[in-house]
Image: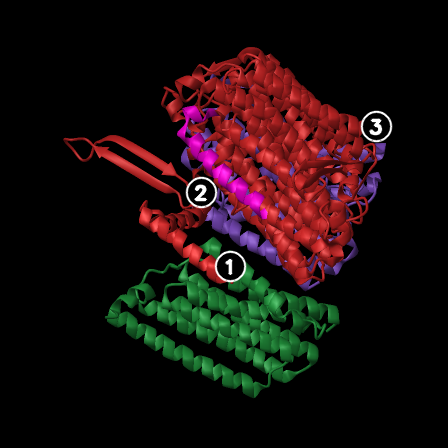
Chain colours: A red, B green, C purple
Amino acid sequence: MNTTEAAFIAMAVAASAAVAAAIVLPARSRVVWVGVFTALSATAGGVASLAVLVGGDSFVTVIPDVFPLGGVRLEFDALSALFTFGTALVAVPAAVYGIGYSGQGPSSRPAQAAWPVLVWSVMMVPAAGNAIGLIALWELMALSSTVLVLAEHHHNAEARRAGQWYVAMTHLSLLAIALALFILVHQTGGESFAAMRAGAANVGPVAASTVFLLALVGFGVKAGVVPLHVWLPRAHPEAPSHVSALMSGAMVKLGVYGLLRVGWDLLDGGPLWWGAVVLTVGLISAMFGILHALVASDLKRLLAYSTTENVGLIFVGVGAAGMFAASDNRPLAAVALAAALLHVLNHGAFKGLLFLGAGSVLTATGTRNLDHMGGLGRRMPVTAATFAIGGMALAALPPLNGFVSEWLLLQSLVHSLPSEAASVAVAMPVAVAVVALTGGLAAAAFVKAFGSAFLAMPRSAEAEAAHESPFTMRTGMIALAGVCIALALLPTLLANPLERAIAPATGIADGAPISTNGVYVHLAGIQAGLSPLMLTLGLLIGVVAVFAVVRRSRARSTVRDIPPWGCGRTLQTSRMEYTATSFAEPLQRVFDDVLHPEIDVVVDHHTESRHYVESIRYHSETRDGIENRLYEPLLAVARRWGDRARSVQNGSIHRYLTYSLVVTVVVLLVSQ
Amino acid sequence: MKHTTFVQLLDLAVGAVLVTSFAALWLRRLATVTRVIAIQGFALAGVAAVIGVYEHETELIAVSVMVAVLRGLVLPGLINRTMRDGDERREVESLINIPASLLAAAVLTLVAYTATRSVVALDDSAQVRAMPLGVAVGLIGILLVVSRRKAVLQIIGVLMLDNGIALVMFLGTSGVPLAIELGVASDVLLAMFILQVLTSRIRTKFGGTDLDQLRELRD
Amino acid sequence: MNPTGIAVALLQAVFVIACAPLLVGWTRLVRARLEGRVGAPIRQPWRDLRKWFVKERMVSEHTGWVFALAPLVLTGSAVLVAALVPSLSTSSALDQVGDLFAVVYLLLLGTVALSLAGLDAGTAFGGMGASREMTITAIAEPTVLVAIFALSVSAGSSNLGVIVADTLSRPSAAASPTNLLALAALAVVTVAETGRIPVDNPSTHLELTMIHEAMTLEFSGPDLAMIELAAHVRLVVFLTLLANLFVPWGIATTAQPLHLLVAAGAVLVKLTVLATIVATVEVFLAKVRLFRVPELLAASFVLAFLAVTASFFLA
């Protein structure tokens, strides 16, 4: 038995132990043991993936007759291992964090039992090796996450609606994926992935494209790309924060995994337009996501929309890779895919960290509204520091990990010209422009979120009374911040694993995209070089040098605490600070035509004179544009049809008996 | 003239034509837009002159002088007269805001490049490779006509469309006989005269040439 | 990472930091003379820095560690960028460490640090400056990256040394449409990012018209000295990029002292010319309204976009 097999067994055992602990133990110890066993299960998953990624192991096994239709086959290659590794990176700190977080909130039996099941199923989905296995694990993941999203629905009508949207969309995705796999099974004559790969040549181009589009829809819902993203900004904020961290950090990536697996492994790649469609979807998601994140005043909603943006960027990398592979530029395709996969890992780490920080803020202040926070940097220093690290990675600032994957993505896009394919020549400048704009807007969103929540003065009594989170929550956040820093300084360690992970996607690439000597990163076939380690070192040297020069002068002069400059006004209260909404207002105005904010200003004048104002109320709301224009009309149509169809079942016994008569007559006639 | 110098000057002149069309979309004052169209006329004349000097065709140089006079001086002068006669506000009013018009123009440039790909593939000379820019200028002229509210700007858009067509002609055929250019020029001049008279009359009668307001006149 | 390479990098950093206040002084002198005033001597910014260094450090009572850390991060990143940008030679050790994308994102890091400090002050002015600055930076990003795209298509790489070497080896390409359009686009971005007219007035005293100054209202003493020095260095870094990426003649390709001396003289001449142009533009143009700035940046984006299409289609 090799390491991978042992680790898989350990994963399952630990998860079962966690479920058992959730059901059996009383409330206080329940939370602790569930957290510990879940963390162990996730660690086992990490070990299994590392064994495959670094050690070159592989793992194939068949568990027969689990379901009436067939058995479950598990196939764990390097591509699967990368995604499971990403999950493990987020899940271990989230599980530790969950001990402290659940102690103050969702500690009910169902929620605690569903958590290890969710972690286990998210790690196992990439290991599915046949259609039934994939569908079964997908559904298990959907069910456990639904339970967790609804964990706090007793307190909250919003959580109920979020659960409804989530259940509906996730089963839409299941339907699409099942259809796609069904067609594939039918066309290739085999049910396991290996049989599908072998029979890929038998699949005609029309069938292949249908499978691809269905897979795009199904996996796109899970990934949260526009226009299938509407569940994300509702469900991720309502779930408990460690669950949100796992959902945003790991679960949405399974959409990317599925698309890669079906499109470029099982179907062995396709025409150029596949990549072009994925690229377009990615670009639209990135722009839409970051614009809505900018105007969101709910911290977790901001982070959820930012997940849509980053998944959009990953889709840009995958789409570009598909386009390059189809236009015979396979080395560049490998670089683009490596950028996308690296961003999968990086985004998981920093988005997970940001959600954990948001949860910490939520438990301390009781609110998610950025306009009511402030001054938390002094009251919650650990949360503030780790949130700053996650946020800087979100804004793709050096020296953190977001910058490395963004750099890699830009390098792959920039070296695409000159190209013979007209669509590549047209798409790449647009792609670079959109990626650049989303990067700039992401920096603005980070400044808004961090600035409103943690800086200056508290804007409400709850924010003033906040205090730091308990030990387990702090440990989880610090651990994930450490992961971010490690990914930032040593991405060179990932060069070989990335090469192994790209190999199964035979439709795109073969060969080593990144070559490195440990310190410098060079790209295959392109003249490009970066050294994240040296860059960080240079930055530190610069800062320390400046500090050394200034320190003597700073130490010599005393520091006098004074009130800030108020243009002659001496009283400074928190009412005079910029809120998150006012910070984003210029950008909201610039992008007015896309966002369509609803702004109401109600001015009450004094009873005696119109020249004196008694009160002014300003209400601004930006609703999700796609939900407004696409889903609401569709739901309205569905409701109308439903109303009309109600007349079919109006309670009259005569009518029902007539139906039976009609059907009997029809059957008699037809069966003649 | 050496070939490399020819290519550089040609690229510069054609680039100037394209940049002036973007500038016409970007500027807010009517008077400046007219000046920019005049510069575009001179740049167009420059293209003809460069090709004429390189290919040693005096006819083309004569054409370039005529283009400079017509499209650089006479027609913009006519447009100025149209503007001066009325006392409308001197600002550009448009249906889509300025950054959006600029982005639309960039997209139209891409469209022009992709649409003329097969033509460009026929011949690898510098003139033919710059032809898509002429198509782009024409498309941007149409964009001006479609998206701007005042009649004066639409006249300028028609003029830009004509400049774009003329640019494609100069680059594609490497020289236009003087007779054809004279014919085209007289047509354009006649059209401009008619438009100018019409605009002045509309303005006197109705007090303005804002098309959205003019639409209210129907029954 | 050989010693000469590191020495060249350090020399470049020291050179840029030493010249930056002098160049800003020159800009102010040109502006003053054009406006009919006598103006302060060129070394006045250095004297200002020295003055602030010994002044008392007053800190608003509501700020925290971000406010104290921000000037260090801003100046530290400016110093690193000063070392990265090829002002004197292309044989610096940092050539393989960071390319043009790294430079852009390091400058973004400095902007973010300053915006956070502005928010930390807790005043309406700080928030206003931070909000406006992030708006302008976000909208200028596409222009910058697409212009880098255009440059790297011609040169085959986004590495600074490679771009400079490519232009040196093909002199006729310096006047190609791609380079001219990219130069125009980056010139507009320089004005926007360094806060000069027509985007922001660096010498205004009216708080409601400030962008960069509003974020730095609360700084005093050595912190203010750091922030001002960082602003000067960032301006010179942008001008050096404009000078040496598009008109690189004079730059050294080795680390020999004589070549470095010649390169220093050449880049000083180019920087002086550019600084004069910046000052002249400041005198003859008016500052535009904040909500007209996106139009200006959209125009520069279109120029950069055309540069990319020209690099591919006209090359």
**Mark 2 residue crowding within 10 angstroms, few (<14) / some (14–19) / many (20+):** some
> What residue is drawn where x is 63% and y is 59%?
A426
Q: Quadrant of the C terminus of chain B?
A: bottom left
Q: Which chain is disc 1 placed on?
A: B
Image disc number at residue A28: none
Report if residue C146 is visible in the image: no
What residue sits right under mark 1 in the picture? B104
Q: Which chain carries label 2?
A: A
Q: Do labels 1 and 3 share a chain?
A: no
Q: In this view, does A53 lie above or below B182?
A: above
Q: Which amino acid does label 2 sit on?
A: Asp
The boundaries of the magenta stretch are A152-176
Q: Residue A59, how many percent across, how many down?
A: 79, 35
Task: Kindly identify the amino acid type of the residue bearing the numbered disc 3.
Answer: Met
Q: On residue A1, which mark appears?
A: 3
Q: How crowded is mark 1: few (under 14 residues within 10 Å), some or many (20 or more)?
A: some
Residue for badge 2 = A624
Q: Is mark 3 on a helix, strand or loop?
A: loop
Instruction: Work out how far the residue at label 1 is from the one at label 3, CA to CA, in angstroms.
Output: 62 Å
- Residue C65 position, x and y percent, is 56, 19
